Amino acid sequence: MDLTYRTELRELNEQNLARFDAKLEQRLVESTAKFEQRLTELNAKLEQRLAELNAKLDSAVAKLDARMNGMTANLHAVLERRLGEQTRWFFVAWASLLIPIIGLWFRG
């Protein structure tokens, strides 16, 4: 009787282990499916946010580019005006030096 009891117990344990393995496998498959679904959702959200950020960045770059073009044009205008003023003063200085030199040359 002891041997039959052990055999029945062993068979019962094997059946329980097989059921446990089947349930564990099923739960792992379900968990994997849930994880993949969450990962797909997060990936979609991340791509959406990156697209929004890229659009904002493009807009900011366009605004900055327009502002820089305006500042560059302003700088060019100021530099041209100042260079014209500086050139006039150089001609005045050269003329004021050239007049006495020519006077000394004719005198001598």
Image (spheres, rainbow, N blue to C red):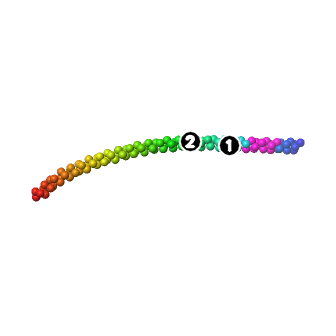
Q: Which residue lies at the image location 78% right of the left edge and 44% below the top edge?
A: 18
Residue 48, labelled with which disc? 2
Amino acid at dot 1: Ala
Residue 6 in sight in this render: no
- Residue 17 among those drawn in magenta: yes
Q: Where is residue 29 in the image (x, y as percent from the top left)?
A: 70, 43
Q: Which residue lies at the image location 56% right of the left edge and 42% below the top edge?
A: 48
Q: Position of residue 102 (x, y in %)?
A: 15, 55
**Mark 2 or 1, nearer chain start:** 1
Q: Quadrant of residue 67?
A: top left
Residue under numbered circle 1: 33
Q: Position of residue 73 (x, y in %)?
A: 36, 46
- Residue 6 among those drawn in magenta: no
Quadrant showing the C terminus: bottom left
Q: Is the magenta stretch mostly helix, strand or loop?
A: helix
Q: Quadrant of residue 34?
A: top right
The residue segment tinted magenta is 12-25
Amino acid at dot 2: Gln
Question: Is residue 90 rendered to the left or right of residue 35?
Answer: left
Element on which disc 1 rests: helix
Question: Is residue 14 rendered to the left or right of residue 55?
Answer: right
Estimate the spatial distance between the alpha carbons at disc 2 and disc 1, rounded to whole Å: 23 Å
Q: Which residue lies at the image location 12% right of the left edge and 57% below the top edge?
A: 106
Q: Which residue lies at the image location 29% right of the left edge and 46% below the top edge?
A: 81
